[in-house]
Image: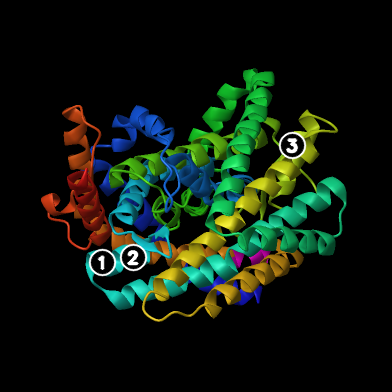
Amino acid sequence: MNEIVSAINAVVWSPALVFLCLGAGLYFSVRTRFLQLRHFREMIRLIFQSKVSNTGISPFQALSMTLAGRVGTGNIAGVATAITFGGPGALFWMWVVAFLGASSAFVESTLGQVYKEKIDGEYRGGPAFYIEKGLGIKWFAWLFAFTTILACGLLLPGVQANAISSSVSTAFSIDTRITATGLALLLAFIIFGGLRRIAAFASAVVPFMAVAYVGIAILIILLNITQVPAMIALIFRSAFGFDSAFGAILGLAIMWGVRRGVYSNEAGQGTAPHASSAASVSHPAKQGLVQAFSVYVDTLFICSATGFMLLITGLYNVEGPTGDVMYTGVMGVGAGPGYVQTAMENLMPGFGNIFVAVALFFFAFTTILAYYYIAETNISYINRTIARPWMNTVLKFGIIGAVVYGTLRTAELAWGLGDIGVGLMAWLNIAAILLLRKPAFACLRDYEAQKAQGIDPVFHPEELGIKGAEYWIERLADEKRSHDQE
């Protein structure tokens, strides 16, 4: 099975996808005049604009749900894996993916808002919606929907569950079968409660754990501040092939940095637009900017925190392309959360191991919830034509089964299946947002123009020549009727 999965991954994650991710991010950055830098303060301001309606959630809740998907095992186990197979330089290429990916996140999340719909009293949107409405290619939209249901409903949850199982076993010596049962019961309780229960759980847990994790990492860095210059130098030397030990794996540093960067921050993958479309905002660009900031939180803050802890302590391993050992800093621990737990335990005996296990549990579990919501949204997209209520029931039990299976399977197989899911979604979504770039750019220009006039931007799709944004046209008409009646 592992050999089959590896063969599929070699095709999905060919160098072409690596260049596509980087190239699309660079193109969007240039065309938007590096909005990820120009609008940094605006991103933060928009997060705390509280607006909740009967059909939507607040920008902060949407950010929390998106971070629930972005911040997961990729921030801990994924960083460790990237360093193992790509060397310390892989962390630099994760930063590059985050910086460029912030513009991709803006484009896809803005498009999600432009072409969203109201279904069963809730806002729904995502790549399937904007592919059909914006591009008018229904078969392409259905292909993305089915791919996403498969990836988020069956392939990706196992990675998160496997990491939880591994870290809990290391920290507490709990049998994996007990962990699998506990995860299944907790997941069932939340997903049968609907969108608002998922949003409430994510907005309560994600910010707290993210701040706590980064705070501990900063403390560790401060305690080892004298080693920071050498660590930064090692990262940059390795990233550009100048390090005597790791220079030979420059290509792997780029590949694994991009691969794990995309897996972690999900920019361009097509997952974020699902949660961002649920937010109640007056202009699509608002949520686009909020989601661009979420990429920074994921990679520049949390992934960097993990990478710095590993590199400062030296408790990591690096393997060459043929499996040869290039550096050994920790014995008897496989690439994954065990590296981070070992590093933290060495620095904070009696506390570090447990803290990483708890952090990883919440990061990974909220990601599983986000995967469920994404898969459910694509089922809602399919059910717009012919209602198939049984599909939601199948999804609920399917994702619970995937979590149990992932908990009990090997990490290698879980990661392999997860990579296939991420890669397939990235191929389809990046192609779509490149084709649909003009409406996103028009939204940004319109938002900036209205801000320059000192007004709170309101979206008028017809004035921008954007077709297919029926929700916004109906919303403006309803607001006009309400105003006329007053």
Q: Which residue is mark 3?
A: 343
Q: Which residue is mark 1?
A: 133
User: Magenta stretch?
Assistant: 412-417
Is tag 2's residue or tag 3's residue first in the polypeptide sequence? 2
The quadrant the N terminus occupies is bottom right
Residue 300 - label: none
Picture residue at 82% right of the left edge, 49% below the top? 170
Q: Tell us which disc is closer to us: 1 or 3.
A: 1
Could you tell whether 116 is left or right of 95 in the image?
Answer: left
Q: Position of residue 46 (x, y in %)?
A: 38, 34
Relative vertical location of residue 186 with respect to residue 41 in this rendering, above or below: below
Q: Position of residue 425 (x, y in %)?
A: 43, 65
Query: On the image, which quarter does residue 178 sit in?
Result: bottom right
The reply to whether the magenta stretch includes residue 128 is no
Element under disc 1: helix
Q: Amino acid at mark 3?
A: Ala
Q: CA distance from mark 2 to mark 3?
A: 44 Å
Residue 241 visible in image: no
Q: Which residue is mark 2?
A: 129
